[in-house]
Amino acid sequence: MQQSHIKSEIRNWTRLELRQWLEKQSEQDSKIQPYRADQIFYWLYRRKVKDFSEMANIGKPTRNLLEKHFRIGTLKRDQVQRSRDGSLKYRLMLEDDKAVETVLMPHADHHTVCISSQVGCGMGCDFCMTGKMGLIRNLEVSEIVNQVLEAWQDLPEGANLRNIVFMGMGEPFHNYQNVMRALEIFTDVHGFNYSHRRITVSTSGLIPKIRRFGKEQIKANLAVSLNGVNDSVRSALMPVNKAYNLEKLVQACREYPLESRKRITFEYILIRNLTDSLEDAKGLIRLLHGVKFKVNLIPFNETPGGPYQRPEWPSIDAFQQYLLDRGVLATLRISKGQDIAGACGQLVVQETVPA
Ligand code: SF4
């Protein structure tokens, strides 16, 4: 990573990069010790400090050096909305006055944070409010990581932030490099120290990136947004299907190298009279033959003026039961935060407010 006269955001750096940079600095100053990178990560991600002066066991020469070259940035809260179900939706301002949304969701014994990887999204899924924004820009590594730190501050005493899911704004595989670097920081033993089993990356189905992700060292969970069991329905809902159709997508999933006990999650939005029939359920089983998978059913969250409706509950239940009866692991996700538009496909920044 290149240095310039502008201070670099330290949370854009992986520990290995920081260590290599310190190694270089130690050639000029023997008081600089490269192994301090481990401790710096501890302070940044375990203690979550906001200033280098708080890094108590880092010697003055190294602290001064850090202060000279780096800064510890944070995201500015513009708005926090609390849902009736306890979810918190954050609208967080970036330095260029763009905004992203992040959702912290409580469960019975843990919390999940849903983070964004882009401002807006270029995939144009027809059911998705974020897709209507178009792609504005990719997020920096620090902007991804700082969303988790921001949500962390609101965890109830002793609560556990167990899962990180890349299901907020954006197609994570369109910002591949930065998402991978964020995963490196999330799973770093000296950093957040998350198990890769607790992190899920959800894609709309970019096959070359699915294949590449399968070869990465960090084996985070893969989720694929499916939402249709034939090409005509899926292409109407998700333009990505025109480039990577269902046959190719499912083939890539069959070939995806899964660790034992892991499965690919297919997210399937139930839309009234479009994706919710028992014929669709049957088609789903047929389509995914040969893939180790589970299905996450998401009843559509209606948006004002949108063309799609949520099915009635009996249809939702019947769809799930059809899958369960045939041995398919099918969970029903009742999206959290619906009353604050924090649910799947509803994240959208309405306007950008100057800082
Ligand atoms: S569903 Fe995901 S991939 Fe599709 S437009 Fe929305 S954010 Fe982008």
Image (spheres, helix red, strand yellow):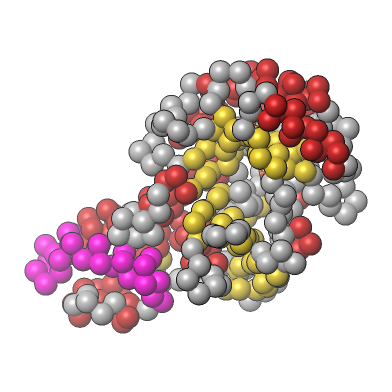
Q: Is residue 134 visible?
A: no
Indicate whether residue 181 is drawn in magenta: no
Q: Does 36 sit left or right of 52 as displayed?
A: left
Does residue 277 lie above or below 39 as drawn?
above
- Residue 270 percent location from the top left of the image: 78, 38
Q: Is residue 148 visible?
A: yes
Q: How many marks?
A: 0
Q: Does 159 sit left or right of 324 as displayed?
A: left
- Residue 262 percent location from the top left of the image: 47, 34
Q: Residue at x 9, y 69 (%)?
A: 30
- Residue 332 percent location from the top left of the image: 70, 42
Q: Residue at x 29, y 77 (%)?
A: 55
Q: Residue at x 61, y 48 (%)?
A: 167
The quarter of the picture where residue 206 lies is top right
Image-quarter location of ligand 1: top right
Q: Nearer the viewer, residue 172 or 190?
A: 190
Indicate whether residue 41 is drawn in magenta: yes
| Secondary structure that dominates the magenta span | helix
- Residue 267 percent location from the top left of the image: 66, 37
Q: Nearer the viewer, residue 172 or 342?
A: 342
Q: Nearer the viewer, residue 258 or 294?
A: 294
Quadrant assignment for the N terminus: bottom left
Q: Give the residues drawn in magenta, as a range.
A: 23-50
Q: Does 116 sit left or right of 10 as displayed?
A: right
Quadrant assignment for the C terminus: bottom right
